[in-house]
Image (spheres, grey):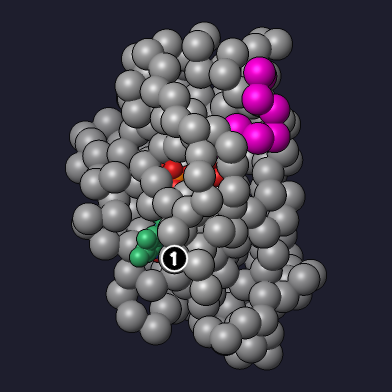
Amino acid sequence: MAMKPAAFAYERPGTLGEALEALARHGSDARPLAGGQSLVPMLSLRLARPALLVDLGRLAGLDELVVRNGAVEIGAMVRQRRLERDPLVAQHVPVLAAATRYVGHPSIRNRGTLGGSLAHADPSAEYPAVALAVDAEMVVRSARGERTIPARDFFLGPFTTALAEGELLVAIRFPALPAGAGWGVEEIARRHGDFALAGAVAVLERGPDGTCSRASVALFGVATRPLRATAVEQALVGRALDSATLREAAALAADAIDEPLSDVHGSATYRRQITPVVVRRAIEAAAARAGF
Ligand SMILES: Cc1cc2nc3c(=O)[nH]c(=O)nc-3n(C[C@H](O)[C@H](O)[C@H](O)COP(=O)(O)OP(=O)(O)OC[C@H]3O[C@@H](n4cnc5c(N)ncnc54)[C@H](O)[C@@H]3O)c2cc1C
């Protein structure tokens, strides 16, 4: 197994325009470099062999975090470590801060970025599922202009997104959760910091009549891409969430898994068995926070 990268050229542009121009010029030969926590190992193993790395580390404006139009807009280069601690994230999208604690270890989160994780689209990563659960939007730029991609259209398969050649993810908009919304993030991994064998992100809201007015449940680590567990969501909305209802809803979770992951870490059968367990834990935590 090769342990050194193939030769590549390296550019570190100072502006977004220069970065987009370099990506447009080199097409599929170029690869953006963010925190390097996934890309550098892939280079070393020669799973990626780009001719040019375009380092995003010096670009102004990609590390901003602002509240705008009811959403927290987070620059793609914001480091994962910041999401753990930022007061705006804690206030408006606490589920994102909670998910961050499961991403690798502090040394990885110090370098790793939000945009890098979403663009990498590891089916076992936490952030894609959070983005799906809260209906986040991806703001994407290329030399041709800007477009916005809803999270539900962004993750296409293992390590595959809707980003086209020459496109950069520049920011992600997370709608602020309403006050009183409850959330939960749960996963089963061999050791803390390992990628999940099964994970779930849940957001629940309690309506004025005391029943569940909104349920979002996203799965990760179980299929080729993050998924919404719509059968679970439908079994929660309009119901008063007692423990029997939560248990019955969670039992429907495995139905969402259309293309199960099966690898050395866990078989498809095992993942199907533990999925309802993580979903039950996530919706129980969310229900408790939502005041059920
Ligand atoms: C030991 C270890 C354990 C880990 N555990 C976990 C874990 O439990 N959960 C988890 O989610 N992750 C885990 N990771 C991965 C980590 O979260 C990475 O930080 C993340 O996947 C990639 O972010 P990055 O900023 O390092 O991106 P990079 O490695 O620099 O890039 C990753 C990919 O995204 C592309 N890219 C980066 N930024 C952009 C952009 N703005 N626009 C378009 N394309 C872009 C790159 O070209 C590359 O293909 C782990 C990593 C290690 C080394």
Identity of the residue drawn at 66% across and 81% down: 262
Note whether residue 141 is visible.
no
Q: Position of residue 265 (x, y in %)?
A: 53, 84
According to the picture, the residue beneath numbered tag 1 turns out to be: 3
Q: Is residue 154 visible?
A: yes
What percent of the width, then of the height, locates residue 113?
38, 41
Q: Is residue 2 left or right of residue 63?
A: right
Which of the pair 244/124 is nearer the observer? 124
141 up-or-down from 54: above or below = above
Query: Which one is in front, 274 or 15?
Result: 15
| 129 is higher (above) or lower (below) than 28 | below
Kindly identify the residue that appears in the image at 38 percent across and 72 percent down: 194
What stretch of residues is rendered in magenta? 24-32
| Secondary-structure class at tag 1 | loop
Q: Amino acid at mark 1?
A: Met
Residue at x 41%, y 37% (from the top left corner):
34
